[in-house]
Image: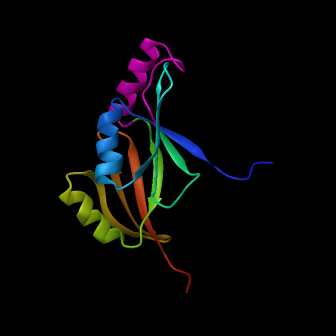
Amino acid sequence: MLSAITISHVFVADQNQALDFYVGKLGLEVSGDQDLGFMRWLTVRVPGQPGRDILLEKPGPPAMDGDSARQVRELIAKGASGFTVGFTTKDCRKTYQELVAKGVECTQEPVEQPYGIDIGIRDPFGNHIRIVQLKTAS
């Protein structure tokens, strides 16, 4: 049976802009960047977390036609993607302040939850991202 999640994806309208956000602002690292001819395979990951990549995927061929790609971009821009990816941090309040200073759109300030403290942000394309500081076991 299955043993691990190795890759997931986030739709982005512009892969260079996505690099600026996910690497430049969130601090992820590029784990792959290849021109496959029919698409650019661009993946990022949390530094030190090999085998858990996020494909920054531009909607379009070969997975979908032009009309479908346009519709996907429009829906994501409206925030219709829902929750796309979640990260953890050791200090949610500090991470929040750092992201605000970098101009990241924050949709929720740090909030105490039963599982810890979390915040909400959006990438430049409209994708919703959650960042949580998990409660430590007592």
The residue that appears at 31% across and 65% down in the rendered structure is: 95
From the top left corner, tell me how far across and down residue 68 is, in percent: 46, 17
From the top left corner, tell me how far across and down residue 40 is, in percent: 45, 28
Q: Does the magenta-highlighted stretch encompass residue 8?
A: no
The residue that appears at 36% across and 37% down in the rendered structure is: 79
Q: Between 121 and 5, which is closer to the camera in this rendering?
A: 5
The residue that appears at 29% across and 52% down in the rendered structure is: 25
From the top left corner, tell me how far across and down residue 100 is, in percent: 22, 58
| Residue 132 figure quarter | bottom left
Seen in the picture, residue 36 relative to 112 is either above or below; the reply is: above
Q: Say left or right for 40 vs 98.
A: right
The span picked out in magenta is: 56-79
Q: Between 110 and 48, which is closer to the camera in this rendering?
A: 48
From the top left corner, tell me how far across and down residue 99 is, in percent: 26, 58
**Camera sees residue 122:** no
Labels in figure, total: 0
Q: Between 87 and 79, which is closer to the camera in this rendering?
A: 87
Q: Does the magenta-highlighted stretch encompass residue 65?
A: yes
The residue that appears at 43% across and 12% down in the rendered structure is: 67
Quadrant where the C terminus is found in the figure: bottom right
**Camera sees residue 31:** yes
Residue sitting at the far right = 1
